[in-house]
Image: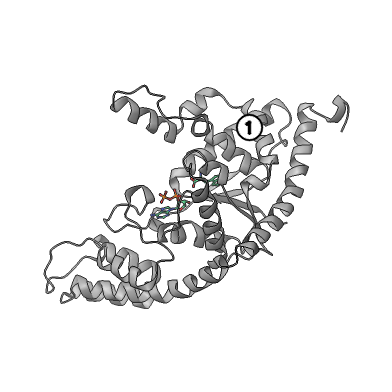
Amino acid sequence: MKKIALTGIKPTGTLHIGNYVGAIKPALELSKDYDARYFIADYHALNTVRDPRELAANIRHVAAGWLAAGLDPERVIFYRQSAVPETFELSTMLMAFTAKGLMNRAHAYKAAAQENRNRGNDPDAGINMGLFTYPVLMAADILLFDSDVVPVGSDQAQHIEMAQDIARSVNFTYTAKTLKVPNALVRSEAAVVPGLDGRKMSKSYGNTIPLFAPEKELRALVMRIVTNSQPVSEPKEPETSQIYQLYRLFAAPEERDDLARRYLAGGMGWGDAKEELFHVMRRELSPLRERFEAVISDPNHVDDLLARGAAKARVIAKETLRRLRHAVGITAGGGGT
Ligand code: ADP
Ligand code: TRP
Protein backbone atom coordinates (compact mmCIF):
# COMPACT_ATOMS: atom_id res chain seq x y z
CA MET A 1 0.00 0.00 0.00
CA LYS A 2 1.24 3.48 -0.84
CA LYS A 3 1.98 5.90 1.96
CA ILE A 4 -0.20 8.93 2.46
CA ALA A 5 0.99 12.50 1.82
CA LEU A 6 -1.18 15.43 2.89
CA THR A 7 -0.78 19.17 2.72
CA GLY A 8 -2.86 22.34 2.67
CA ILE A 9 -2.51 25.88 1.38
CA LYS A 10 -4.30 28.77 3.06
CA PRO A 11 -6.29 30.94 0.62
CA THR A 12 -5.07 34.20 2.12
CA GLY A 13 -4.23 35.84 -1.21
CA THR A 14 -3.33 35.10 -4.80
CA LEU A 15 -0.50 32.71 -5.62
CA HIS A 16 3.04 33.90 -6.29
CA ILE A 17 6.01 32.06 -7.73
CA GLY A 18 7.29 31.31 -4.20
CA ASN A 19 4.13 29.30 -3.54
CA TYR A 20 4.46 27.53 -6.88
CA VAL A 21 8.15 26.61 -6.76
CA GLY A 22 8.26 26.14 -2.98
CA ALA A 23 5.01 24.30 -2.31
CA ILE A 24 2.83 23.34 -5.28
CA LYS A 25 5.49 21.91 -7.60
CA PRO A 26 7.18 19.69 -4.99
CA ALA A 27 3.80 18.48 -3.69
CA LEU A 28 2.74 17.49 -7.21
CA GLU A 29 6.06 15.70 -7.68
CA LEU A 30 5.42 13.79 -4.44
CA SER A 31 1.92 12.81 -5.56
CA LYS A 32 3.49 10.45 -8.10
CA ASP A 33 4.73 8.16 -5.31
CA TYR A 34 2.18 8.73 -2.56
CA ASP A 35 -1.56 8.63 -2.11
CA ALA A 36 -1.97 12.37 -1.95
CA ARG A 37 -4.63 14.44 -0.21
CA TYR A 38 -4.22 18.16 -0.94
CA PHE A 39 -6.65 20.77 0.30
CA ILE A 40 -7.49 24.45 0.59
CA ALA A 41 -7.26 25.42 4.28
CA ASP A 42 -10.11 27.94 4.15
CA TYR A 43 -10.96 27.92 7.86
CA HIS A 44 -7.32 28.66 8.62
CA ALA A 45 -7.58 31.67 6.30
CA LEU A 46 -10.65 32.97 8.16
CA ASN A 47 -8.36 34.02 11.03
CA THR A 48 -7.08 36.84 8.86
CA VAL A 49 -9.23 37.31 5.73
CA ARG A 50 -12.46 39.08 6.72
CA ASP A 51 -13.80 40.22 3.37
CA PRO A 52 -16.23 37.48 2.26
CA ARG A 53 -15.83 38.20 -1.43
CA GLU A 54 -12.07 38.21 -1.17
CA LEU A 55 -12.05 34.90 0.70
CA ALA A 56 -14.39 33.26 -1.83
CA ALA A 57 -12.26 34.53 -4.73
CA ASN A 58 -9.03 33.38 -3.07
CA ILE A 59 -10.41 29.88 -2.58
CA ARG A 60 -11.24 29.53 -6.28
CA HIS A 61 -7.95 31.14 -7.28
CA VAL A 62 -5.85 28.74 -5.21
CA ALA A 63 -7.90 25.75 -6.40
CA ALA A 64 -7.54 26.79 -10.05
CA GLY A 65 -3.82 27.35 -9.42
CA TRP A 66 -3.30 23.77 -8.25
CA LEU A 67 -5.25 22.44 -11.24
CA ALA A 68 -3.35 24.65 -13.71
CA ALA A 69 -0.07 23.44 -12.21
CA GLY A 70 -1.06 19.88 -13.05
CA LEU A 71 -2.94 18.41 -10.09
CA ASP A 72 -4.93 15.44 -11.39
CA PRO A 73 -8.16 15.25 -9.37
CA GLU A 74 -8.57 11.59 -10.39
CA ARG A 75 -5.36 10.69 -8.58
CA VAL A 76 -5.14 13.26 -5.80
CA ILE A 77 -8.01 13.76 -3.36
CA PHE A 78 -8.46 17.51 -3.68
CA TYR A 79 -10.93 19.38 -1.48
CA ARG A 80 -11.76 22.35 0.68
CA GLN A 81 -11.17 21.92 4.40
CA SER A 82 -14.59 23.48 5.10
CA ALA A 83 -16.33 20.79 3.04
CA VAL A 84 -15.05 18.05 5.38
CA PRO A 85 -16.84 18.86 8.66
CA GLU A 86 -15.32 15.80 10.33
CA THR A 87 -12.19 17.98 10.57
CA PHE A 88 -13.94 20.22 13.09
CA GLU A 89 -15.26 17.37 15.18
CA LEU A 90 -11.79 15.90 15.37
CA SER A 91 -10.39 19.33 16.20
CA THR A 92 -12.76 19.57 19.17
CA MET A 93 -11.77 16.10 20.31
CA LEU A 94 -8.07 16.95 20.06
CA MET A 95 -8.57 20.08 22.19
CA ALA A 96 -9.01 17.77 25.17
CA PHE A 97 -5.57 16.29 24.57
CA THR A 98 -3.71 19.52 23.82
CA ALA A 99 -1.86 21.24 26.65
CA LYS A 100 -2.48 24.97 26.73
CA GLY A 101 1.25 25.36 27.39
CA LEU A 102 1.96 23.70 24.05
CA MET A 103 -0.05 26.39 22.28
CA ASN A 104 1.71 29.11 24.31
CA ARG A 105 4.95 27.94 22.69
CA ALA A 106 3.75 28.15 19.06
CA HIS A 107 6.03 30.47 17.06
CA ALA A 108 3.23 32.37 15.29
CA TYR A 109 1.35 33.06 18.53
CA LYS A 110 4.53 33.98 20.40
CA ALA A 111 5.59 36.36 17.65
CA ALA A 112 2.19 38.10 17.67
CA ALA A 113 2.24 38.43 21.49
CA GLN A 114 5.82 39.74 21.41
CA GLU A 115 4.92 42.27 18.74
CA ASN A 116 2.14 43.53 21.04
CA ARG A 117 4.57 43.84 23.97
CA ASN A 118 7.08 45.70 21.81
CA ARG A 119 4.38 48.21 20.99
CA GLY A 120 3.42 48.55 24.63
CA ASN A 121 0.04 46.85 24.03
CA ASP A 122 -1.71 44.11 25.95
CA PRO A 123 0.01 40.88 24.79
CA ASP A 124 -3.32 39.42 23.66
CA ALA A 125 -4.42 42.46 21.63
CA GLY A 126 -5.88 41.40 18.28
CA ILE A 127 -5.13 37.71 18.88
CA ASN A 128 -8.15 35.50 18.30
CA MET A 129 -8.66 31.91 19.42
CA GLY A 130 -8.37 30.84 15.78
CA LEU A 131 -4.74 31.96 15.84
CA PHE A 132 -4.10 30.54 19.32
CA THR A 133 -5.57 27.13 18.47
CA TYR A 134 -4.30 27.11 14.86
CA PRO A 135 -2.01 24.11 15.47
CA VAL A 136 -4.93 22.00 16.78
CA LEU A 137 -6.99 22.53 13.63
CA MET A 138 -3.90 21.77 11.59
CA ALA A 139 -3.34 18.56 13.62
CA ALA A 140 -6.96 17.59 12.87
CA ASP A 141 -6.39 18.17 9.12
CA ILE A 142 -3.44 15.82 9.26
CA LEU A 143 -4.55 13.14 11.72
CA LEU A 144 -7.99 12.73 10.13
CA PHE A 145 -6.37 11.10 7.09
CA ASP A 146 -3.78 8.87 8.81
CA SER A 147 -1.12 10.91 7.00
CA ASP A 148 2.39 9.49 6.86
CA VAL A 149 4.15 12.55 5.49
CA VAL A 150 3.28 16.23 5.45
CA PRO A 151 5.29 18.23 2.92
CA VAL A 152 5.77 21.77 4.29
CA GLY A 153 8.14 24.71 4.39
CA SER A 154 10.46 24.93 7.41
CA ASP A 155 8.20 27.56 9.02
CA GLN A 156 5.56 24.85 9.47
CA ALA A 157 7.84 22.21 11.02
CA GLN A 158 6.83 23.18 14.56
CA HIS A 159 3.16 22.64 13.70
CA ILE A 160 3.88 19.09 12.58
CA GLU A 161 5.79 18.44 15.83
CA MET A 162 2.71 19.65 17.67
CA ALA A 163 0.50 17.30 15.64
CA GLN A 164 2.86 14.49 16.68
CA ASP A 165 2.64 15.52 20.35
CA ILE A 166 -1.15 15.63 20.22
CA ALA A 167 -1.37 12.24 18.46
CA ARG A 168 0.98 10.71 21.03
CA SER A 169 -1.07 12.09 23.86
CA VAL A 170 -4.19 10.40 22.41
CA ASN A 171 -2.29 7.17 21.79
CA PHE A 172 -0.89 7.20 25.33
CA THR A 173 -4.41 7.49 26.73
CA TYR A 174 -5.95 4.75 24.54
CA THR A 175 -3.88 2.44 22.35
CA ALA A 176 -0.69 3.04 20.43
CA LYS A 177 -2.57 2.68 17.15
CA THR A 178 -5.42 5.08 17.80
CA LEU A 179 -3.84 7.77 15.63
CA LYS A 180 -1.06 7.56 13.07
CA VAL A 181 1.87 9.81 14.10
CA PRO A 182 2.81 11.85 11.01
CA ASN A 183 6.22 13.07 9.88
CA ALA A 184 7.11 16.39 8.31
CA LEU A 185 8.83 16.40 4.96
CA VAL A 186 10.57 19.74 5.19
CA ARG A 187 11.62 21.22 1.90
CA SER A 188 15.25 22.21 1.63
CA GLU A 189 16.11 25.86 2.11
CA ALA A 190 17.43 25.77 -1.46
CA ALA A 191 13.80 26.00 -2.51
CA VAL A 192 13.29 29.36 -0.81
CA VAL A 193 12.42 31.75 -3.60
CA PRO A 194 13.78 35.29 -3.22
CA GLY A 195 11.45 38.22 -3.81
CA LEU A 196 12.03 41.42 -5.77
CA ASP A 197 13.95 42.97 -2.86
CA GLY A 198 16.07 39.90 -2.10
CA ARG A 199 14.18 38.87 1.03
CA LYS A 200 12.09 35.66 0.94
CA MET A 201 9.23 36.20 -1.49
CA SER A 202 6.13 36.70 0.62
CA LYS A 203 2.77 38.44 0.49
CA SER A 204 3.60 40.07 3.79
CA TYR A 205 6.68 41.79 2.34
CA GLY A 206 4.93 43.01 -0.83
CA ASN A 207 7.85 41.70 -2.91
CA THR A 208 6.10 39.02 -4.94
CA ILE A 209 5.87 38.07 -8.58
CA PRO A 210 2.29 36.82 -9.06
CA LEU A 211 2.25 33.32 -10.53
CA PHE A 212 -0.27 34.25 -13.20
CA ALA A 213 0.97 37.74 -14.05
CA PRO A 214 0.38 38.66 -17.72
CA GLU A 215 3.62 38.72 -19.72
CA LYS A 216 3.94 42.48 -19.71
CA GLU A 217 3.63 42.61 -15.95
CA LEU A 218 5.98 39.66 -15.53
CA ARG A 219 8.62 41.44 -17.58
CA ALA A 220 8.14 44.72 -15.73
CA LEU A 221 8.52 42.93 -12.37
CA VAL A 222 11.63 41.05 -13.46
CA MET A 223 13.14 44.39 -14.51
CA ARG A 224 12.40 45.73 -11.00
CA ILE A 225 14.49 43.07 -9.20
CA VAL A 226 16.97 44.89 -7.00
CA THR A 227 20.65 44.61 -8.07
CA ASN A 228 23.90 46.18 -6.92
CA SER A 229 25.89 48.78 -8.83
CA GLN A 230 28.62 46.49 -10.23
CA PRO A 231 29.62 47.62 -13.73
CA VAL A 232 29.01 45.36 -16.74
CA SER A 233 32.67 44.40 -17.16
CA GLU A 234 33.09 43.10 -13.60
CA PRO A 235 32.81 39.33 -12.95
CA LYS A 236 29.70 38.51 -10.90
CA GLU A 237 29.02 35.91 -8.24
CA PRO A 238 26.02 33.73 -9.25
CA GLU A 239 25.27 32.55 -5.69
CA THR A 240 24.71 36.04 -4.33
CA SER A 241 22.59 37.29 -7.22
CA GLN A 242 18.79 37.11 -6.87
CA ILE A 243 18.50 37.04 -10.62
CA TYR A 244 20.60 33.91 -10.77
CA GLN A 245 18.78 32.35 -7.79
CA LEU A 246 15.50 32.77 -9.66
CA TYR A 247 17.00 31.72 -13.00
CA ARG A 248 18.16 28.41 -11.49
CA LEU A 249 14.59 27.52 -10.60
CA PHE A 250 13.35 27.81 -14.18
CA ALA A 251 16.36 26.89 -16.33
CA ALA A 252 17.65 23.55 -17.59
CA PRO A 253 20.96 22.36 -16.00
CA GLU A 254 23.02 23.34 -19.08
CA GLU A 255 21.44 26.79 -19.12
CA ARG A 256 22.23 27.21 -15.42
CA ASP A 257 25.88 26.29 -15.88
CA ASP A 258 26.16 28.48 -18.93
CA LEU A 259 24.78 31.58 -17.20
CA ALA A 260 27.00 30.94 -14.15
CA ARG A 261 30.05 30.81 -16.44
CA ARG A 262 29.09 34.06 -18.14
CA TYR A 263 28.52 35.74 -14.76
CA LEU A 264 31.99 34.73 -13.60
CA ALA A 265 33.66 35.73 -16.86
CA GLY A 266 32.54 39.37 -16.59
CA GLY A 267 31.02 41.40 -19.41
CA MET A 268 27.47 40.50 -18.43
CA GLY A 269 25.24 43.34 -17.23
CA TRP A 270 22.26 42.98 -14.91
CA GLY A 271 19.92 44.10 -17.70
CA ASP A 272 21.01 41.17 -19.91
CA ALA A 273 20.70 38.75 -17.02
CA LYS A 274 17.16 39.97 -16.39
CA GLU A 275 16.23 39.43 -20.05
CA GLU A 276 17.45 35.84 -19.79
CA LEU A 277 15.53 35.33 -16.57
CA PHE A 278 12.37 36.68 -18.17
CA HIS A 279 12.85 34.29 -21.09
CA VAL A 280 13.02 31.13 -18.93
CA MET A 281 10.22 32.27 -16.65
CA ARG A 282 7.95 33.06 -19.55
CA ARG A 283 8.70 29.68 -21.12
CA GLU A 284 7.42 27.83 -18.05
CA LEU A 285 4.75 30.22 -16.81
CA SER A 286 2.92 31.20 -20.01
CA PRO A 287 1.35 27.76 -20.59
CA LEU A 288 0.52 27.64 -16.87
CA ARG A 289 -1.22 31.01 -17.07
CA GLU A 290 -3.21 29.92 -20.11
CA ARG A 291 -4.39 26.79 -18.29
CA PHE A 292 -5.23 28.89 -15.22
CA GLU A 293 -7.33 31.27 -17.30
CA ALA A 294 -9.21 28.37 -18.87
CA VAL A 295 -9.86 26.74 -15.47
CA ILE A 296 -10.91 29.92 -13.66
CA SER A 297 -13.29 30.87 -16.48
CA ASP A 298 -15.42 27.87 -15.48
CA PRO A 299 -15.86 28.28 -11.72
CA ASN A 300 -18.70 25.77 -11.57
CA HIS A 301 -16.35 23.11 -12.82
CA VAL A 302 -13.79 24.01 -10.13
CA ASP A 303 -16.50 23.89 -7.45
CA ASP A 304 -17.72 20.57 -8.80
CA LEU A 305 -14.23 19.03 -8.73
CA LEU A 306 -13.73 20.23 -5.16
CA ALA A 307 -17.11 18.84 -4.12
CA ARG A 308 -16.28 15.46 -5.62
CA GLY A 309 -12.93 15.50 -3.83
CA ALA A 310 -14.65 16.36 -0.55
CA ALA A 311 -17.05 13.42 -0.98
CA LYS A 312 -14.07 11.07 -1.35
CA ALA A 313 -12.29 12.69 1.60
CA ARG A 314 -15.37 12.32 3.81
CA VAL A 315 -15.54 8.56 3.29
CA ILE A 316 -12.06 8.31 4.86
CA ALA A 317 -12.75 10.99 7.46
CA LYS A 318 -15.95 9.33 8.69
CA GLU A 319 -14.11 6.06 9.15
CA THR A 320 -11.36 7.73 11.23
CA LEU A 321 -13.95 9.47 13.38
CA ARG A 322 -15.91 6.27 13.90
CA ARG A 323 -12.69 4.64 15.13
CA LEU A 324 -11.93 7.55 17.46
CA ARG A 325 -15.42 7.94 18.86
CA HIS A 326 -15.31 4.27 19.66
CA ALA A 327 -11.87 4.56 21.25
CA VAL A 328 -12.91 7.41 23.56
CA GLY A 329 -16.35 5.99 24.40
CA ILE A 330 -18.51 8.51 22.57
CA THR A 331 -20.75 6.18 20.66
CA ALA A 332 -24.22 6.37 19.14
CA GLY A 333 -26.87 6.14 21.83
CA GLY A 334 -24.20 5.84 24.49
CA GLY A 335 -23.88 2.11 23.78
CA GLY A 336 -21.70 0.20 21.29
CA THR A 337 -21.23 1.58 17.78
P1 ADP B 1 3.23 34.03 2.02
O1 ADP B 1 4.55 34.05 2.77
O2 ADP B 1 3.31 34.75 0.73
O3 ADP B 1 2.06 34.47 2.90
P2 ADP B 1 2.16 31.39 2.47
O4 ADP B 1 2.61 31.41 3.89
O5 ADP B 1 0.70 31.51 2.18
O6 ADP B 1 2.96 32.51 1.65
O7 ADP B 1 2.75 30.09 1.79
C1 ADP B 1 2.04 29.05 1.18
C2 ADP B 1 3.04 27.97 0.83
O8 ADP B 1 4.06 28.46 -0.08
C3 ADP B 1 3.80 27.44 2.05
O9 ADP B 1 3.95 26.04 1.90
C4 ADP B 1 5.15 28.14 1.99
O10 ADP B 1 6.18 27.36 2.58
C5 ADP B 1 5.37 28.30 0.48
N1 ADP B 1 6.16 29.51 0.20
C6 ADP B 1 5.74 30.80 0.39
N2 ADP B 1 6.69 31.68 0.02
C7 ADP B 1 7.75 30.94 -0.40
C8 ADP B 1 9.07 31.27 -0.90
N3 ADP B 1 9.46 32.51 -1.05
N4 ADP B 1 9.89 30.24 -1.23
C9 ADP B 1 9.50 28.96 -1.08
N5 ADP B 1 8.29 28.59 -0.62
C10 ADP B 1 7.42 29.55 -0.28
N1 TRP C 1 -0.46 26.15 8.12
C1 TRP C 1 -0.12 25.84 6.74
C2 TRP C 1 0.58 27.08 6.12
O1 TRP C 1 0.42 28.17 6.62
C3 TRP C 1 -1.35 25.47 5.95
C4 TRP C 1 -1.99 24.22 6.49
C5 TRP C 1 -3.19 24.12 7.14
C6 TRP C 1 -1.44 22.91 6.41
N2 TRP C 1 -3.43 22.81 7.48
C7 TRP C 1 -2.39 22.05 7.06
C8 TRP C 1 -0.26 22.38 5.89
C9 TRP C 1 -2.14 20.68 7.20
C10 TRP C 1 -0.03 21.02 6.02
C11 TRP C 1 -0.96 20.17 6.67
O2 TRP C 1 1.28 26.94 5.13
Q: Closest to the observer: 321 or 290?
A: 290
Q: Residue 48's spot in the image, x, y percent?
A: 46, 40
Residue drawn at (56%, 68%) of the image: 297
Q: Quadrant of residue 90?
A: top right
The residue wearing badge 1 is: 168
> Neighbour class for label 1 at 10 Å: few (<14), some, many (≥20)?
many
> Is 253 drawn above or below residue 320 in the view shown?
below
> Is 163 drawn above or below residue 152 in the view shown?
above
Q: Residue 328's spot in the image, x, y percent?
A: 76, 27
Do we see residue 251 in this rendering?
A: no
Residue drawn at (51%, 53%) of the image: 58
Q: Residue 270's spot in the image, x, y percent?
A: 20, 70
- Pointer 1 residue Cβ closer than 8 Å to ligand 2: no
Residue type indicated by callout 1: Arg
Q: Is 330 placed left or right of 143 in the picture?
A: right
For the N terminus, the image quarter is bottom right
Query: Tag 1, which secondary structure?
Result: helix
Residue drawn at (39%, 74%) of the image: 282
Q: Closest to the observer: 39 or 127?
A: 127
Q: Closest to the observer: 305 or 154?
A: 305
Q: Residue 31's spot in the image, x, y percent?
A: 60, 61
For the C terminus, the image quarter is top right
Q: How is the image coloured?
A: one colour
